[in-house]
Image: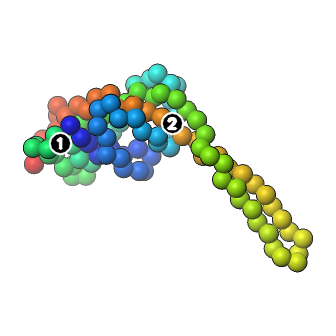
Amino acid sequence: MRAVVEIATAQYVVEPGQVLVVPHVSVEPGIVLELRPLVLIGDGQEVSIGTPFTAGIVRAEVLEHGKGAKVIVFKKKRRKGYKRFRGHRQLYTRIRITEIDAANSSTV
């Protein structure tokens, strides 16, 4: 079974057992998240498309939090003596999709 779920304004196609890296979610590792809303859910033969969302639930376990690779921000204006050097590391959360529950979703 597959589903399209929206996490932090980004949409992901997920399957049970899949490990995803998503933008930071403020939940402790080991906690099970219930991800809503679902945009689409189906198993290939029966598909439910939300208008705009379906009634199903995707459960995901938070594995770990981390920081991405460093992005260097360097600004310079020539002949003016202006230089600024900054770095940035984006926070992320690694989650594992454990279950896709389509019990309450209607099929199209």
Image quadrant in which you'd find residue 79? bottom right
How far apart marks 1 and 2 lie (CA) works out to: 26 Å
Q: Is residue 8 left or right of residue 92?
A: left
Asked whether 70 or 77 is in front, the reply is 70
Q: Which percent across, then down, holds residue 61? A: 41, 27
| Quarter of the image that includes the N terminus | top left
> What number is the disc on residue 93?
2
Residue at 28 percent across and 29 percent down: it is 99
Asked whether 83 or 55 is in front, the reply is 83
Q: Is residue 43 left or right of residue 3?
A: left
Q: Is residue 94 above or below residue 73?
A: above
Residue at 26 percent across and 42 percent down: it is 3
Asked whether 95 or 38 is in front, the reply is 95
Question: Can the viewer see residue 37?
Answer: no
Q: Which residue is mark 1?
A: 42
Question: Can the viewer see residue 77?
Answer: yes
Image quadrant in which you'd find residue 72? bottom right
Q: Which percent across, then down, holds residue 75? A: 76, 66
Q: Which percent across, then down, holds residue 52? A: 25, 52
Amino acid carrying label 2: it is Thr
Residue at 50 percent across and 25 percent down: it is 29
Residue at 31 percent across and 46 percent down: it is 13
Amino acid carrying label 1: it is Gly
Crowdedness near tag 1: few (<14), some (14–19) or many (≥20) residues, C-alpha within 10 Å: some
Q: Is residue 95 left or right of residue 3?
A: right
